[in-house]
Amino acid sequence: MLLMEYLRGMSDLAPHELRILIAVERERGFTAAAASLGMTQSAVSHAVRTCERKLGAVLFDRGRHGARPTAAGTRAVAYARRIVRLLEAMGQEVRGAGDGAVTGPLRIAAFRSAAAHLLPAVLERLTGRHPGLSPEVRIVREIGRGTAGEVADGRADLGIATLDGAGPPPGLVGARLFEEPYALAHPAGGAHADPRTLPLIDWDENCGSYTRAWWAGQDWIPPATIRAEDDTVVLSMIARGMGMSIMPMMTLAGAPADVAVTPLAPRPPRREVGYVTTPEAAGSAAVRALIRELRSAGAAPEWAAAGQTAVR
């Protein structure tokens, strides 16, 4: 359901009611939400009941555990966050209309390697052009709904995401920024004549639909002997000589000196990295400015490696 369609169904909810729904979901209880908003618990409870009546659905399960959003509540709060953010952006852009200033917070969700190797240069240029912007970067694991889920739920204005070729998830807009190859990461030095014979170390976010076919066709890749939650842990283990891994090049931009990077030839697996945002946020001046910088960075990534010898 698009935002405007949802707005027609909740047109009589006031902004303060939306903020109360957000607070109850965030605090997981009426009392804590009331404290965070400077209200009484009874006022918060009454507001939630009013919202439920207007929307025609139970939004929170009440109990000793506090208040947990129902499926309807989860969806309502996601749209509430997006609507409140749109109202904030409206104020910022109206105030800056006279002089073209782009100001205010800009919430970005990114997976770790993008946050470490793509965003710093992008945000340096962005804030140089628009000093009134205040970027907020959250690192989100790119598994499950990943960064796209943060955007859809209203927690981020834009997400740096891995795309599977099918485009952004339903309800979001976005585009590819660049495609990066995977490479073989292994201990540096001559101790291992063929790094492909080493044990495999893998991490939870690695691979996906975009590399699964290539991965399945490689008879030299053994089952993983070690799995980790974070790619930096994998790199540290490789630096200690514990094994090898197949990793995207942006992740390998931060590899320790004791990790060697060998391209996979002749046709390495690749993944698409792009951005996703909501249709309403895509029209805001802050998000448009960020997308321009991302596209510029994607045309010539600063982290791209070159000059390495391929292994076949």
Image: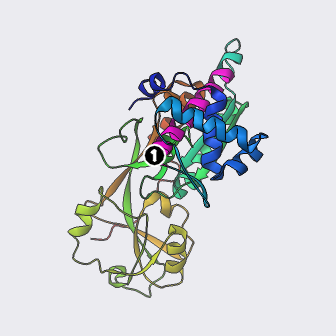
At a point 46% along the width and 47% down the height, the residue shown is 149
> How is the protein colored in the picture?
rainbow
Q: Quadrant of residue 41?
A: top right
Q: Is residue 113 above or below residue 299?
A: below
Q: Position of residue 35 (x, y in %)?
A: 77, 47
Return the residue nearer the eye: 89 or 121.
89
Q: Position of residue 56 (x, y in %)?
A: 46, 33
At a point 36% along the width and 57% down the height, the residue shown is 181
Q: Is residue 119 above or below residue 269?
A: above
Q: Which residues are magenta?
A: 70-92
Q: Quadrant of residue 13?
A: top right
Q: Position of residue 287 (x, y in %)?
A: 56, 31
Return the residue nearer the eye: 121 or 21.
21
At a point 69% along the width and 28% down the height, the residue shown is 103
The answer, for residue 294, to whether it is visible in the render is yes
Q: Residue furthest top?
A: 98
Q: Position of residue 123 (x, y in %)?
A: 63, 41
In terms of secondary structure, where does tag 1 sit? Answer: helix
Quarter occupied by the C terminus: bottom left
At a point 63% along the width and 21% down the height, the residue shown is 90
* Amino acid type at image mark 1: Ala
Instruction: Identify the residue position indicated by label 1 in the image.
Output: 148
Q: Residue furthest bottom?
A: 191
Q: Quadrant of residue 46?
A: top right
Q: Is residue 82 magenta?
A: yes
Quarter occupied by the N terminus: top left
Q: Residues within 10 Å of mark 1 (few under 14, many from 20)?
A: many
* Left-right relation of 36 to 148: right
* Left-right relation of 135 to 219: right
Q: Is residue 73 above or below residue 252?
A: above
Q: Is residue 45 magenta?
A: no
Magenta part, dominant SS: helix
